[in-house]
Image: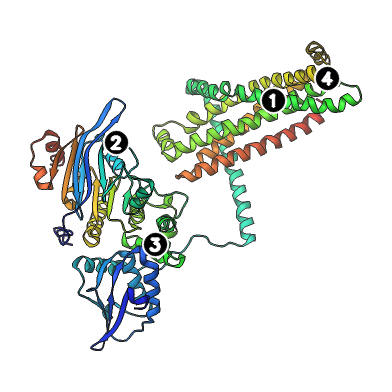
Amino acid sequence: MDTNATPAADQRAEHVLEVDSVVTRFGAAVIHDRVGFKVTRGEVVALIGSSGTGKSVLVKEIIGLLRPAAGTIRLLGTDVWGASQEQLNALRRRFGMLFQDGALFSSLTVAENIAVPFHEHTDLPAALIPPLVGFKLALVGLPPDSATKAPAELSGGMRKRVALARALALEPEILFLDEPTSGLDPISARAFDRLVRVLSDSLGLTVFIVTHDLDTLLSIADRTIVLSGGKVIADGRVDAVMKLDAPWIKSYFSARA
Amino acid sequence: MSEAGLWIRHEVEEGASVLYLTGVWRLSNLAAIADALQSLGLRVRGQFVLDGSRLQEIDTAAGFTLYRHLAAIGCTTTTVSVRSFDGRHERLLALVHERMTCPPAASRSVHRGLTRRVGASAMHVWDLLRSQTAFVGSVALELLTLFRRPRLFRLKETVSQFETICLDAIPIAALVTFLIGVVFAYLLGLQAQRYGANIFVVDGVGLAICRELSPLLVAVIMAGRSGAAFTAQIGTMKVQEEIDAISTLGLSPVQVLVIPRLVAITIALPLLVFVGDLAGILGGVLVGELQLDISAVTFFDRLHSVLPMSAPVVGLVKAPVFAAFIALIACRMGLLVSRDARSVGENTTSTVVQSIVWVILLDAIFAVVFQRLDI
């Protein structure tokens, strides 16, 4: 697979995500102090930063689960925190989210989990849904017999794949991944990375990854954003960011040396 | 243009069938696209060429539907080729084609016959009873250990459990038994008044509340309140792998979780039953004052002379037995939770049902035994 292919080079530069001077406070603690960045369509962007710098919080703010104290967030052209309920619902069909632990519905089978978005957001005939669900499973590299299993019967890597299939069900334009490779063995983690890269290259997906995983960063990210002390301290190509002279960045990239 | 022509056109060029994909092939149009494919009535005739020159957009769902249809009419990889697609669309179709080796996902609901279901349920109940017996045995062994090494007893945890089980439950236990006392005295009074036998209401209320109603009602409240809480707490710990952590640290989950709860509720329930006795009798006193012309002084005087000491004692003797059953069932169901959120709910429901059934069953057994013993 060619990981150097410029994704969506045939598309005009278009910002699918604009985060502008976002401020987040939990009580007296300031988590984000005027955080801002833009993401272009087709990019694979990784957000890194030490634990507790509010990476997951930022993703929750972007997808409309948690209101920031100040600042604006435009996702696919919609102002997330100024939009009406209908606009938000329409927006929710256009992005996918992979939660840290998969967040599969434990009372449903794998196939039923993936079918939920089809039932809720499309008016597809019932006969079309099972084959589509089967295809989504194959797309994320799961064997067909996993369809009838309960989430509790799956390994961590398989749960993440199922969650990815569910996030991809409605053919999203942008995909948010919250620590997709945490808790996976290195082999499964690299396979997951490759999968994300293949999907991004072939489907023209924009992917926004929150990660701690240096390998994910080096192998699939086009760009990386570093969050530290409530601010964006670096934003650019991975190899450029690596050379920056900031203490946290230096120790992060030398952690494995 | 026909409805199907909006999405796809079929033309024969130089002996090959060319399919021109047209417009926006996205999930939102999938039903129409599937119909269009069906209505073309394609058959395998040599080569198929997919032409993407008129295609605006395509996603995996639509690509999959197309390839699935082609596969259904007997096309193979060698008989389908693509041309004039946007580079990105071609990559997408290639990925779809590569990944689609999927039979439709079967649904899980396997229909089982009545006999099998009855048998399965019976086996389930049998397994539950057997494992419950084994659990009671292991708790008994741990209690024995406790007598030999009293330092293992977790006093702090037990006291904190006692607070939530007993002290926090006093208002609800008192309220329920008081109201039942009122209702019981009122109904008994209606009958007694006809015969001018008002004073016998005191006998009836005293006996019924102390011997039966207070122990039974308070135990049912405990089953719903503390039993459910035990199962939910221990079950959630099981889901979070805390139980495994306890075992790994060399502690016994029974010592840490079960025995404090068992001891706390076994002490708490008789005390709550006593509170219930008082509240129920007060309910009777209220009705006596308002409806039956029995003053409070007369009521207590009569109660003192007619209520046998055995009545409240029987009630207080039953209470710890009920409590032990509730605690053992609740803790067992908590430990039986599997690692998903749904089973916490299922087991909590099961705890409440089992506890209440057992409390009533035990009450019936006590009734028969005390009858035989002339108590």
User: On screen, A90 above or below B74?
Assistant: above
Residue, disc 1:
B177
Do circles 3 and 1 both sit on a common chain? no
**Between marks 3 and 2, how big is the CA–CA gap?**
35 Å
| Spot occupied by residue A54 in the image (x, y as percentages of width and height) | 26, 36
User: On screen, B219 above or below A90?
Assistant: above
**Between marks 4 and 3, how big is the CA–CA gap?**
72 Å
* Earlier-in-chain disc, 1 versus 4: 1
Instruction: Answer left or right for A169 relative to A148.
Output: left
The C terminus of chain B is located in which quarter? Answer: top right
Residue, disc 3:
A133
Nearer-the-camera pick, B216 or A113:
A113
Q: Residues within 10 Å of mark 2 (few under 14, many from 20)?
A: many
**Between marks 1 and 4, how big is the CA–CA gap?**
20 Å
Do circles 1 and 4 both sit on a common chain? yes
Marks 3 and 2 in Cβ contact (< 8 Å): no
The residue sitting at 29% across, 86% down in the picture is B46
Which numbered mark, 2 or 1, is in the foreground of this view? 2
Residue, disc 4:
B292
Instruction: Answer left or right for B330 relative to A58.
Output: right
Q: Secondary structure at mark 4?
A: loop
Q: Amino acid at mark 2?
A: Pro
| Spot occupied by residue A103 in the image (x, y as percentages of width and height) | 38, 47
The N terminus of chain B is located in which quarter? Answer: bottom left
Q: Amino acid at mark 3?
A: Val
Disc 2 chain ID: A
Q: Secondary structure at mark 2?
A: loop
Q: Residue A68 got which mark?
A: 2
Q: Amino acid at mark 4?
A: Leu
Marks 1 and 4 in Cβ contact (< 8 Å): no
